[in-house]
Image: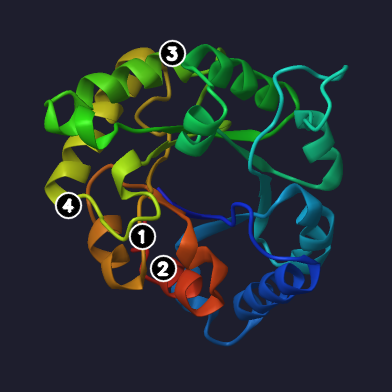
Amino acid sequence: MRKLIAGNWKMNLLRDEGVALARDLAGRVAGPSSSGTAAADMVICPPATLIGSVVEAVAGSGIGVGGQDCHAAASGAHTGDIAAAMLTDLGCSHVIVGHSERRQDHGEDDAMVKAKAEAALAAGLVAIVCLGETEDEREAGRALAVCETQLRGSLPAGADAGNTVIAYEPVWAIGTGRTARPADVAEVHDHIRSVLAATLATGDKVRILYGGSVKPGNAGELLALANVDGALVGGASLKADDFWAIAEAAPAG
């Protein structure tokens, strides 16, 4: 299975900065040193203001572009929101839904995440469905139960290996510099795989990404774990050298 390295730029970068970063990455894919990433697919998810410009910047490179969120409705009176079809119209191939920052900052629950993921699928996008436990939940020994509940509640109807990706991001590791121990990552990913395999016909092939302070120094070890099919990268995706190094760390699948 080919690894997927997805970059979540979050609310960062203005147009010139974003275009420069996208062009840098696109140039590396086309360059003579691109053999290291042959085993990995790459997607970058810029802020909505940059999507059109970034799509143009990476055109023809094979790098996909995704949105960071979408609304569950196809259209309507939802000021400030973006429909999944609008992302498709801009040239996106993916969209992140259910990120912990959306769950926490905007009160999104599993039902809302599921509705957004279903809207993404209806618009022809690949939904990157995020889930993960808080530090309190992990310390209480509830990490697996919390992740399973979020997975079952957020998984869109019609999900399969071609249109859905799961991203496990322990909340306490996002943007903190703390990374889950490889054994803990393996345990959660193995559990997610077992749930997917029992739920979906193609559950054994759905890609499961790890996110939470992924950086060049730990990417190789994390990406070598069974059932870790890629990474959802936050801060390190804002630096071309770091994001490229993470992609190069992906073993052949």
Judged from the image, the secondary structure of the residue bearing numbered disc 3 is helix
The type of residue carrying mark 1 is Val
How far apart, in angstroms, are the residues tagged by discs 2 and 4?
16 Å
Of the residues tagged 2 and 3, which is closer to the observer? 3
Position of residue 84 measured from the top left corner of the image (x, y, whole percent): 75, 30
Residue under pointer 3: 153
Q: Is residue 160 left or right of residue 17?
A: left
Judged from the image, the secondary structure of the residue bearing numbered disc 1 is loop
The type of residue carrying mark 3 is Gly
Which residue: 53% across, 33% down? 105
Residue under pointer 1: 214
Residue under pointer 2: 246
Q: Quadrant of the C terminus?
A: bottom left
Nearest the viewer among 123 and 73 is 73
Judged from the image, the secondary structure of the residue bearing numbered disc 4 is helix
Closer to the chain start, of discs 2 and 4, is 4
Q: Residues within 10 Å of mark 1 (few under 14, many from 20)?
A: many
Q: Is residue 123 left or right of residue 151?
A: right
How far apart, in angstroms, are the residues tagged by discs 2 and 3?
31 Å
Position of residue 106 measured from the top left corner of the image (x, y, whole percent): 57, 28
Quadrant hosting residue 209 = top left
Most extreme residue toward the bottom is 32
Closer to the chain start, of discs 1 and 2, is 1
Q: Residues within 10 Å of mark 3 (few under 14, many from 20)?
A: some
Q: Is residue 26 left or right of residue 224?
A: right
The reply to whether callout 1 and callout 2 are in contact (CB within 8 Å) is yes
